Image (cartoon, helix red, strand yellow):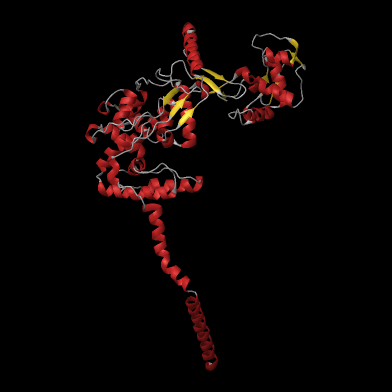
């Protein structure tokens, strides 16, 4: 028994020794494998240096900046409409000249733990950024004020993992070199607030025509919300209503962090903000529409500082003519309480925009910059051709098909019957399709949609480019009379 056990152990020992010797012989016969293991750490350091540390800018350069090149927007004849970024207009001010309410608003919306972290916020900001990156397959925000300062002043706008690592390293470095108040001061003097306004002092002058010292809570909360997306949240941009929503969010955050009371927040929301009139821009609604599209495609930094030269389809002569015409017609209708108007002129063959008037006066307060041509509106009878075109395409009708324009009601499940009427309150008997469309009769149009089905018209509208009409279950037969919402530009 013992002999058997001893023999078994001896056999296992011989096998183990044999395997060790074999492995050793392999290493000896293939020395490059051993060298690879030794060189791997050095290779990682070498690669890291070239990817991350090579040409890493010094935080000492934070007081320096390069003047970016403007993006110019021209009309179809090469006439300048606007410099999206004419020059980097910056007036640095010490932190002592910046009101406490401005600092509090900025910290509340951008980085509430600014005075507690050391450059990055792994619990709140970085974790959110990592999760968003994994789930959406793109790098997201989550940056502290220090990181944003580094991005704005020292790094390129590209969104890559390598740049994010460089940003984190530099944020730590900045925190070692500068006290918190100095970092906040540099941030408020460096970040973009839209267009030519870089820094809080220039932003106060651009939007309100005053010094930063004179800003009140309502104005400070509006400005504090701009740096995250200056084009999107600009009160002078294509969506001024978003500036108001962003301001409310800033006030809510300030209230949560006990900087202001609930009453102060409500008073600031209700306070009417008087903006400084912007000049030096032609066809402003169109320019902001173009800028928004450029930002969507290339990003804020490229558009504001990349020196793009953008030739558009706009005809400036026609633009100025229709702008004056709209203003004159609205003035004539004042007694009827008509206060606004908009117009879009396009080239039917290509869809090119020749003129765009989003409101009677872009610079009028409080909502002159709101662009009606890009907003959702009911199209009325202008959508009827989509319905009739579908019937012709399906060969259900021809231009000569007769429709009975008589009193007609359509059954609605669990709802009263739908009984459309014509705009003139009359019935016109038997009419051909071409006459029904030409005279915009409602009853024949509803009958045409009944034959086409709402589902098929929604699909046809989408094929035409009317992508705001999507879910067929939301619409009924009134869709052909303008029951959905579309954008004029579509």
* Residue 42 rendering spot, x and y as whole percentages: 39, 63
Q: Nearer the viewer, residue 179 or 217?
A: 179
For the view shown, which residue lies furthest in the front direction? Answer: 78
Q: Nearer the viewer, residue 403 or 80?
A: 80
255 left or right, relative to 34: left
The quadrant where residue 288 appears: top left
Residue located at (48% from left, 79% from top): 24
Asked if one can make out residue 16 in the rendered structure from this viewpoint, the answer is yes
* Residue 29 rendering spot, x and y as whole percentages: 50, 77
How many labels were placed on the picture? 0
Say if 56 sits above or below 35 in the image. above
Q: Nearer the viewer, residue 468 or 93?
A: 93
Residue located at (72% from left, 13% from top): 435
Residue located at (73% from left, 26% from top): 393
The quadrant where residue 403 appears: top right
Residue located at (39% from left, 54% from top): 50
């Amino acid at each position: 028994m013992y002999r058997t056990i001893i023999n078994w152990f001896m056999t296992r020992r011989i096998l183990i020794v044999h395997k060790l010797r074999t492995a050793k012989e392999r290493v000896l016969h293939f020395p490059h494998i051993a060298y690879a293991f030794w060189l791997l750490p050095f290779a990682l350091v070498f690669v890291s240096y070239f990817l991350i540390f090579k040409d890493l800018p010094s935080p000492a350069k934070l007081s320096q900046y390069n003047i970016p090149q403007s993006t110019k927007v021209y009309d179809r004849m090469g006439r300048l409409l606007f410099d999206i970024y004419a020059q980097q207009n910056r007036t640095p001010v010490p932190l002592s000249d910046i009101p406490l309410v401005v600092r509090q608003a900025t910290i509340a919306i951008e980085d509430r733990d600014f005075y507690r972290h050391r450059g990055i916020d792994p619990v709140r900001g970085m974790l959110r950024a990592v999760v968003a990156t994994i789930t959406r397959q793109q790098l997201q925000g989550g940056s502290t004020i220090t990181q944003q300062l580094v991005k704005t002043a020292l790094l390129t706008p590209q969104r890559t993992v390598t740049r994010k690592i460089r940003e984190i390293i530099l944020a730590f470095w900045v925190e070692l070199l500068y006290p918190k108040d100095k970092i906040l001061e540099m941030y408020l003097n460096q970040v973009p607030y839209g267009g030519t306004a870089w820094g809080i002092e220039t932003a106060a002058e651009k939007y309100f025509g005053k010094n930063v010292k004179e800003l009140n809570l309502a104005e400070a909360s509006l400005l504090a919300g701009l740096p995250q997306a200056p084009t999107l949240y600009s009160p002078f941009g294509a969506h001024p209503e978003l500036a108001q929503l962003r301001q409310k969010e800033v006030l809510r955050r300030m209230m949560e962090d006990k900087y202001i009371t609930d009453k102060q927040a409500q008073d600031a929301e209700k306070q009417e903000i008087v903006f400084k009139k912007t000049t030096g821009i032609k066809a402003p609604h169109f320019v902001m529409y173009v800028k928004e599209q450029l930002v969507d495609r290339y990003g804020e930094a490229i558009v504001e500082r990349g020196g793009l030269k953008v030739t558009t389809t706009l005809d400036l002569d026609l633009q100025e003519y229709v702008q004056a015409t709209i203003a004159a017609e609205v003035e004539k209708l004042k007694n009827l309480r008509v206060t606004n108007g908009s117009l879009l002129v396009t080239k039917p063959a290509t869809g090119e925009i020749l003129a765009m008037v989003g409101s009677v006066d872009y610079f009028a307060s409080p909502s002159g910059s709101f662009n009606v041509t890009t907003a959702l509106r009911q199209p009325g009878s202008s959508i009827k051709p989509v319905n009739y075109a579908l019937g012709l395409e399906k060969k259900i009708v021809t231009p000569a098909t007769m429709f009975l324009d008589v009193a007609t009601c359509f059954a609605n499940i669990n709802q009263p019957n739908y009984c459309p009427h014509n705009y003139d309150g009359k019935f016109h008997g038997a009419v051909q399709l071409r006459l029904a469309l030409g005279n915009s009769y409602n009853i024949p149009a509803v009958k045409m949609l009944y034959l086409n089905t709402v589902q098929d018209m929604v699909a046809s509208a989408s094929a035409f480019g009317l992508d705001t009409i999507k879910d067929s279950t939301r619409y009924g037969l009134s869709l052909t009379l303008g029951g959905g919402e579309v954008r004029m530009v579509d």
